[in-house]
Amino acid sequence: MRHSTVTDTTPERVPFGELFTHHMVTAHWTGQDGWSAPRLEPFGDLRMSPAMVGLHYGQVVFEGLKAYRREEDAVAVFRPDDHAARLRRSAERLAVPALADDTLLQAVDLLLAADGGCLPDQPGLSLYLRPVLYASEAHLALRPARQYAFLLIAFVTGGFFSDRPDPVTVWVGRDHTRAAPGGTGGVKYAGNYAPSYAAQEQARQAGCDQVVWLDPVERRWVEELGGMNLFFVRGSGPSAQVITPPATGTLLPGVTRDSLLHLAARQQLAVREEPVSVGQWKAECLDGTITETFASGTAAVVTPVGVVRDGAQSWQVGTGRAGPVTLALRDALVDIHTGRAPAPEGWLRTVRTQGSRPGPARSQESLVGSGQ
């Protein structure tokens, strides 16, 4: 693998998923020994058989969580226990031996203790952690593998769309569905993502940033935005209501989604999980009932939706800009991420990093970037 370096730490110049840190954590599973203890080692290429089960049959699940700079020698991980629990649920759905929650937390501690100092003390930047469980056995019979591997890597990132709450334009996907009842839509299965690329390309060709997924049965109920959860705001001021589609098994129950529901209730906003159809979304935007729409996710944090396109039709949400409820919830979440506001019990895990924090310019020079 060819390595590249980056010397500019401006958040807009830090691409998502390219600027990896020095180390990774690995572990292995066999039926006889179970999971080995996680081990820290240098970031590098993996060795695998051409007949590896995960490569051929997709027995792969993963997670995504973030760590944020604290004082000179510490970072804070956001809700790692909840991500560990969701990784375990994803593994169970794909017949992968579940990694104990404590083992994932130990792996996170190992990696951040070694590489947490790579994160500059600069607004808008965070460390994104990617744990992966995959079938590593070499065989091509149609059965669950008998050997598995765990991998944890990290990269420095800015915002997924932008580090400002800039509104996005979205495309209602009519030709494809993301998930099916009884399928894998409610877990972070690697196979959920590549099938979304064709719809995302349709959105891009229509001049949109992301695709809106509809339910797989009636093709009318709004479910997700790309890989993010969606929220609708009805009304304004103290009487505003925050609505999100219910997690019925075909959309991912996001950790950020759950955090925002909690924060909205804490701000004394009415909160409901309720189905919203595309037609209802359009009609309520046009008559002023729906005043804001926003998406949430670990990568995107909170991103407002400004315009919706559905074939030849389009409509604006509210003013077309980030609304007051969107901004208030985003600020409340970011303030917890960055330590400007206290976090609810159990939401943050602080990890001490080794050595001094590098300066902003040198920290990026020391990171490994992906190459072809």
Image: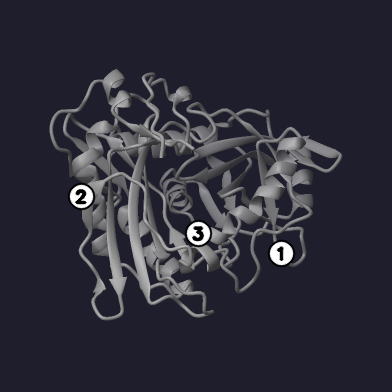
Of marks 1 and 2, the one in the foreground: 2
Q: Earlier in the sequence, mark 1 or mark 2?
A: 2
Q: Secondary structure at mark 3?
A: loop
Query: Alpha-carbon distance for marks 1 and 2?
Result: 41 Å
The image quarter containing residue 185 is bottom right
For image coordinates 41% across by 20% down, the residue present is 10
52 relative position to 122: left or right? right
Q: Position of residue 231 (x, y in %)?
A: 58, 47
Could you tell me residue 177's position as x and y percent? 70, 59
Residue 167: x %, y % from top left: 61, 31
Identify residue type, mark 3: Pro
The mark lying in front, picked from 2 and 3, is 2
Give the residue drawn at x 43%, y 43%. 267
Question: Three-letter amino acid code at disc 1?
Answer: Pro
**Residue farthest toward the left in the current orientation of the protein:** 355
Check whether the beta carbons of the residues at disc 1 and disc 3 lie within 8 A of each other: no
Q: Which mark is residue 363?
A: none
Ranked by sequence position, the earlier of labels 2 and 3 is: 2
Residue at numbered disc 2: 110
Q: Quick one: quadrant of the N terminus?
A: top left
Q: Is residue 86 visible?
A: no
Left or right: 173 in relation to 63: right
Label 3 sits on residue: 253
| Residue type at tag 2 | Leu
Residue holding disc 1: 216
